[in-house]
Amino acid sequence: MGRQPCCDKLGVKKGPWTAEEDQKLINFILTNGQCCWRALPKLAGLRRCGKSCRLRWTNYLRPDLKRGLLSEAEEQLVIDLHARLGNRWSKIAARLPGRTDNEIKNHWNTHIKKKLVKMGIDPVTHEPLNKQSKTEQSPSHGHNSADNHITENDGTAANSSEDNSSTTPTENCSTTDDSILLDSICNDESLLTSLWLDEPPLADDSWNSTVPAAETCNDQTSLPSWEDSIAWLLDCQDFGIHDFGFDCLNDNELNTTNTYAKQ
DNA sequence: AAGCTTCTCAACCGCCGTGGC
DNA sequence: TGCCACGGCGGTTGAGAAGCT
C-alpha cells in the first residue's frame, strides 16, 4: 500500500525552476505568507509539488540567505557543531544565520569531508584516522557518533582547524564578527545542549518574523510595492544579503529590522 | 579546440515526527 | 488507539560548470 505521494505526480513539473516560477512563488509568499505548502502550488498557479516549493523558497529564494562559499569561521563552526551534533544539518544551519541545511550539507560533502580526511581526521567521528582504525573493532564505537559527540568534546575538531588555512583558500574574508560568532557558540555549552534537546532554532525564528502572515500584513501603507519587493528579492538572489552588510546583524537586530520594515 | 573527467550544488526522494480527527 | 495529512529532515542524484589532457 504505502504512503500517498506528497502530490499528484501527474502534471507536476520537475527540474530547475524558471525565473517566472520563482517570481510566482515570491509573489505568493509575500502576499500570503508561508501557509500550507501542499495547497500553495495550486493557489500560486505553479505546476509544482508543495515540497518542491518549500525547498525552493527555503534554500534559494528566502531574502535573508547569504550566497557564496562559507567563510573560514563558518566552516570551522560547522566542523565543531558536526562533531557534537552529527549529521543534524538543520540544527547546524540554525546556528549559521543566512545558511541553509542543504548548503551546509553540500559544503560538508564536497569540501569539509575531504579536508578532514586530508588532515587525517575521520569526518564521521572526528577522531584521528589511525586512532580510529585501532578502535573500530569495538562494536559500540561509531555506531551513533552524534550521541557520542554530544556527551563530550575532546577538542579534536577545534584543533583540526589549525592548518585549515594552508589547505583551503579563503574565498570569503573571515571577519571578526564570524570569529566572535564562532567563539560564542562553541564556548556556550548550554546553547549546544539546548540544540541537542531540540530547542527552537534562533535563526529560523528570526526568519519567521520576516514573512508576514496574511492576517498581519494587511497594513501595507508603508510597504514597498510588490514590484519593488520582488526586484529587491531578486537582487538578494543575485548578491546575497551578505553583500548588503546585513549579516553583521544578530537575530534580534534582524527582528527589529524586519519589524520596522513591516510598519 | 575537442573530448573526457571531476566537481558543485539545486533538486528530488523517501522516511520520520507531530498534530488533528 | 490508529489513521491520515502535512511539514521537515537527511541522503542521494544528475545536469551543468570547471578543470584537465
Image (spheres, coloured by chain):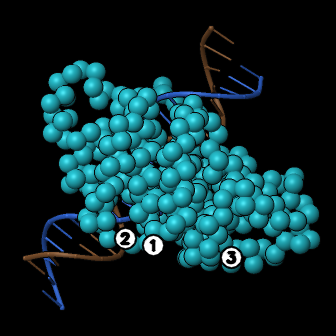
Chain colours: A cyan, B blue, C brown
> Looking at this view, is A102 or A91 the one in front?
A91
Q: Quadrant of residue A129?
A: top left
Asked if marks 2 and 3 touch (Cβ < 8 Å), the reply is no
Tag 3 residue = A232
Determine whether, in the image, residue A107 is placed left or right of residue A208: left
Chain-order first, disc 2 or disc 3: 2
Asked if marks 2 and 1 touch (Cβ < 8 Å), the reply is yes
Tag 1 residue = A173
Kind of residue at disc 1: Cys
Chain-order first, disc 3 or disc 1: 1
In the rendering, at what x and y percent does residue A228 appear? 75, 78
User: Of helix, strand and loop, which one carries label 2?
Assistant: loop
Kind of residue at disc 2: Thr
Tag 2 residue = A170
Q: Quadrant of residue A161?
A: bottom left
Q: Residue at x 31, y 65 (%)?
A: A165
Q: Chain of mark 2?
A: A
In the rendering, at what x and y percent does residue A45 appear? 68, 61
User: Of helix, strand and loop, which one carries label 3?
Assistant: helix
* Residue A26 visible in the current orientation: yes
The quadrant of the picture occupied by the C terminus of chain A is bottom right
